[in-house]
Image (spheres, rainbow, N blue to C red):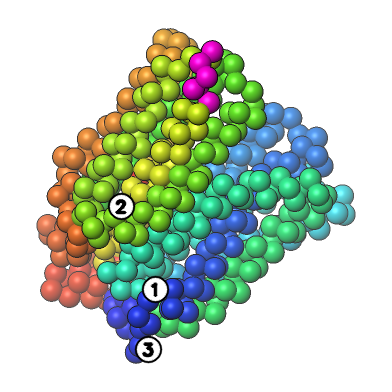
Amino acid sequence: MPSAASGSARPRPSGLWRDADFRRLWWGQTASQLGEHATLVMLPLLAVLTLDAGAGQLGALRAAGQAPVLLLSLFVGAWVDRWRTRTTMVLADAGRALALGALALAGLAGGLGMPGLLALTFAVGALSVFFDVAYQASLVRLVERGRLVRGNSALEGSRSAAQTGGPALGGALVSSLSAPLAAASGALFFALSFLSIRRIRRAEPMPARQEKPVRVRRRINEGVRFVVGDPFLRAVCLASAAFQFSFAATMTVYLAFLPRELHLSGAVVGLALAAAGPGALLGSLLAARLPDRFGHGRVVMGAAAVGDGVFLCVPALDRSSAVTVPVLLAAGFVFGAGGQLVNVTLMAVRQAVTPDGMQGRAAATITWAGMGLTPLGSLAGGFLAGEWGLRTGLLVTAAGMALSPVIMALSPLARLGRRLPSPHDGLPSAAHFGAPGGTTAAVPDRGIRPRPPGRSEE
């Protein structure tokens, strides 16, 4: 299936930010991310303030919002490859706005209970999976492949800002308004995203359908086999899985290490965690320039080594040292910058080597493989901290994050230059993947008929 970027007859503006359709996507994605991250704070607060929820119920509520990532990502990837990404995004936005609106009405009427809140939280989480997979696949259909890094830099920059400012915004809304009205405010962000993305005018061809539809299971298998069979995507998937597992383990120990070993207050712990947000913004800006200057391989390797390695200095800190807090802030900033630089660069590589008809499934497969290991990583971190102590446990888990850049160093990713690879470069024998979803001629000379933290590749 030809991409929208090649299929549109409309002349391209000379600069990415002069492209009105890209600006509409960016505004919509920014509003959606703000709404999503604000909602992650507002819903638990609503449960506490309105329903007097306990810690166990809050844990169940968080699990209800996170479960769709593991349960639905692969199915959503298959779905996105059969439909226009724009349609998927606007329907997801409309659904989330309606869900939060219903939640606000139920709260105001006094008819909201914990079962209803759990169901609405799961629904919002499921629709967020649809939106996130679709927006990762949408850019490659909207702009030329040579602009993917700059486009991803802009989109991931707004996502980083939302991750930093969204929770603060959600808390402020609940503090200044009642919890139901705060939920209604969250619905407004999704409505704004719906209106912005709906105004995109560039044609996005509807994938052709086969006379006999391919089963979802087969389409999922094709997506997994495609990622495993492509050396670039296989390396991204393995590096993402290694990073997510080790990072989950590290954060489990880190969150106990700061207050117990360093005796830091909750406010200082929050400040140390928030330092990654400004770093991620810097990483997004650097990702728009550094790969074109130094090459994608050098940038991703250097950023991963520095960003992941910075946590190795934390176990050496002492609670009585005057440099403890500045070092923690600097470590969070460097980690955020390096991680986001890796995320943006790897997302551009993934989009560049993946045919249009496989974009959704590739993003979903990598997301599922990485995020699926996070619960195990958290358990491993807790076990190591209990067996070896917090300081040793943090050292071991932080060292484990070095496995991700090692995987990339041993893969074709390390040899990438200034030019992004094409779908032809990474496909050893892709014709055997068949015709997933009935899409047409994504890579004509190879006979393929198919169509996302980066490391997070969420």
Residue 181 painted magenta:
no
Q: Is residue 323 magenta?
A: yes
**Coordinates of residue 290 in the picture (x, y in percent):** 29, 55
Dot 2 or dot 3, earlier in sequence: 3
Residue beneath disc 3: 10
Q: Residue at x 46, y 56 (%)?
A: 157
Instruction: Specify the farthest residue to the front.
Output: 322
Label 2 to label 3: alpha-carbon separation: 29 Å
The residue identified by callout 1 is 16
Quadrant of the rendered image containing residue 245: top left
Secondary structure found at label 3? loop
Q: Residue at x 55, y 76 (%)?
A: 198
What residue sits 76% from the left and 34% below the top?
A: 53
| 93, above or below 9, in the image | above
* Closest to the observer, 74 or 263: 263
**How many residues crowd around disc 1 within 10 Å: few (fewer than 14), some, or many (20 or more)?**
some
Residues drawn in magenta: 320-325
Question: What whole-number distance in Å separates the C-alpha atoms at marks 3 and 1?
Answer: 14 Å
First along the sequence among labels 1 and 2? 1
List the residue tagged with mark 2: 346
Above or below residue 263? Residue 87 is: below
Percent across and percent down for residue 384 are 42, 16
Amino acid at the residue labelled 2: Leu
- Upstream in the sequence, badge 3 or badge 1? 3
Which-is-in-front pick, marks 3 and 1? 1
